[in-house]
Amino acid sequence: MKLSRIFGTALLAVALAGNAIAAQNTAVTPRSSHQTSGDNQRTLSFKIAKEVIDGKVKYYDEQTHKITYFHDGAYDQQALAEINRLLEDHEKNSEPDHGMDKGLMDLLYGLKTKEEARHPGLNVVFHVISGYRSPETNAGLRTDPKNPFRASVSKDSMHMRAKAIDIFVPEIPGEELRDTAWCMQKGGVGWYPQFKDMFPYRYIHVDTGRVRHWGFTPQTLKCP
């Protein structure tokens, strides 16, 4: 069965976060080049989901966007601008005014590093369901009676602050990705067992707000 545009949009833009305290941005050192040399280099890879049809994820393009956003001891402004475009609100063609939170990129980099160490030979690509969300999109999702996820949409979503992202990695069980993110203690981690039959992958929410969780019981985890 083909999902409706409303359903697809809701699934890809659902606010999967409770109320949170915003984390502060990391200071940026301006750069004039986009070189990728240096000892301290941080690279992330993304694919941006568009909709779900017959249980299969469709993407805006099939390209894996690999971006080195930090090198030579500084954040790369051009690379960050590319990330902002990738993670924009695609419904409104709207980028966050102040860019995606650099702390969120560092959280993802830490998650990638830990998972790649656990799975030798794996190059982690984050498949993005929702990045930045405009206030208009967020409000619409909260009030649309046709949106089956509206009860999960926070009025003060961290997505609107460009400090949250919903992701999955096809090669990694969602439970493992969730537990690794929680053990990092870098912000909020959300899990959605109630949506398990609506989406072909188990995905998680991470943000750079205060450390908190929902949808699972972290007391049972044994963090390294």
Image (cartoon, grey):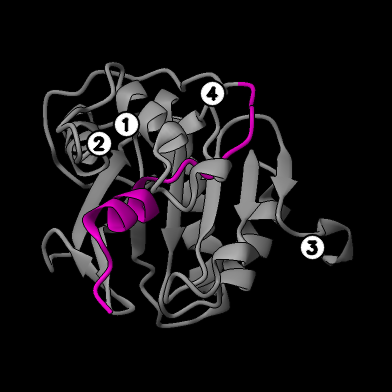
* Distance in Å between CA atoms under marks 3 and 4: 30 Å
Label of residue 156 in the image: 4
Horizontal relation, residue 176 to residue 171: left or right: right
Compared across the picture, whether 184 is left or right of 172 comes to right
Q: In which quadrant of the rendered view does residue 99 lie? A: top left
Residue 125 x, y percent position in the rendering: 34, 66
Earlier-in-chain disc, 2 versus 3:
2
Q: What residue type is labelled 4?
A: Asp
Q: Where is residue 89 in the image (x, y as percent from the top left)?
A: 25, 36
SS type, badge 1: helix
Position of residue 170 measured from the top left corner of the image (x, y, whole percent): 41, 76
- What range of the chain is rendered magenta? 1-21
Indicate which disc, 3 or 4, sits on the residue closer to the N terminus: 4
Measured in 3D between alpha carbons, the distance from the residue under mark 4 to the one under mark 2, in whole angstroms, is 16 Å
Left or right: residue 90 compared with residue 188:
left
Q: Could you say whether the residue bearing mark 2 is in a helix, strand or loop?
A: loop
The residue wearing badge 2 is: 89
For label 1, the residue is 137
> What residue is shown at x 47% (from left), y 38% (from top)?
164
Q: Residues within 10 Å of mark 3 (few under 14, many from 20)?
A: few
Q: Which tag, 1 or 3, sits closer to the chain's start?
A: 1
Residue at (51% x, 80% y) in the render: 119
Q: Earlier in the sequence, mark 1 or mark 2?
A: 2
Do the CB atoms of the residues marked 1 and 2 lie less than 8 Å apart? yes
- Residue placed most toward the observer, 84 or 40: 84
